[in-house]
C-alpha cells in the first residue's frame, strides 16, 4: 500500500496502477483513462493541501486469508494529517488495492 501511495505522490501512475486490482486486464484505452483520472484527482488534491511530508501505515485488519483493510496516514507540510483506509486483496504473494466490491 505504501509503495502505491508513494508512487502517486511522485506522479508515477504506471507504478501505482500495478498495485491495483481492476478485476481483469486493462487495455491501453482503459489505462490511459485511469491515468487521466489520477492526474485530475491529484491536481485537485495538491491545490487543496500542503505538500506531503510522509505517508505512514497505521494498522492492518485481516478479513480472512486474502483480504485486509489497511489504515494509513498522510502528514502534510502545514502540520495537518489525513487518515485513510483501503481494502486490499492477495494474489499469491502479492497484495493489490481493491477498487471494486
Image (cartoon, rainbow, N blue to C red):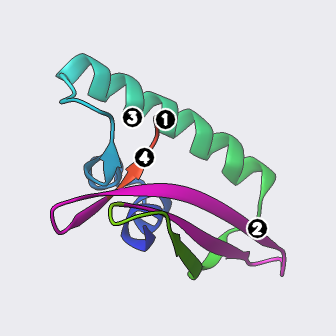
Asked if residue 82 lies in the magenta stretch, the reply is yes
| Residue 68, label in figure | none
| Residue 82, label in figure | 2
Q: With respect to residue 84, does 13 lie above or below?
A: above
Examine the residues drawn in magenta and state their main secondary structure.
Answer: strand
> In front: mark 4 or mark 1?
1
- Identify residue for label 3: 35
**In this rendering, position of residue 48 left or right of residue 12:** right
Q: CA distance from mark 1 to mark 2?
A: 24 Å
Q: CA distance from mark 4 to mark 2?
A: 20 Å
Element on which disc 1 rests: loop
Which label's residue is closer to the chain start, 1 or 3? Answer: 3
> In front: mark 3 or mark 2?
2
Query: In the rendering, at what x and y percent does residue 65 appear?
Result: 34, 66
> In front: mark 1 or mark 3?
1
Element on which disc 3 rests: helix
Which label's residue is closer to the chain start, 1 or 2? Answer: 2
**In this rendering, position of residue 22 left or right of residue 28:** right
Which label's residue is closer to the chain start, 4 or 2? Answer: 2
Asked if residue 89 lies in the magenta stretch, the reply is yes
Quadrant location of the N terminus?
A: bottom left
- Identify residue for label 4: 98
Q: With respect to residue 100, does 94 lie above or below?
A: below
* Residue at the (44%, 29%) spot, across then down: 36
Element on which disc 2 rests: strand
> In front: mark 3 or mark 4?
4
- Identify residue for label 1: 101
Q: Nearer the viewer, residue 67 or 78?
A: 67
Q: Which residues are magenta?
A: 67-95
Q: CA distance from mark 3 to mark 4?
A: 17 Å
* Residue at the (39%, 62%) spot, across then down: 4
Amino acid at each position: 500500500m505504501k509503495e502505491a501511495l508513494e508512487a502517486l505522490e511522485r506522479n508515477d501512475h504506471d507504478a501505482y496502477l500495478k498495485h491495483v486490482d481492476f478485476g481483469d486486464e486493462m487495455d491501453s484505452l482503459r489505462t490511459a483513462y485511469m491515468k487521466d483520472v489520477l492526474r485530475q484527482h491529484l491536481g485537485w488534491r495538491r491545490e487543496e493541501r500542503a505538500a506531503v511530508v510522509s505517508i505512514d501505515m497505521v494498522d492492518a485488519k485481516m478479513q480472512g486469508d486474502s483480504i485486509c483493510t489497511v489504515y494509513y496516514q498522510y502528514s502534510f507540510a502545514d502540520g495537518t494529517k489525513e487518515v485513510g483506509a483501503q481494502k486490499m486483496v492477495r494474489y499469491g504473494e502479492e497484495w493489490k488495492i481493491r477498487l471494486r466490491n
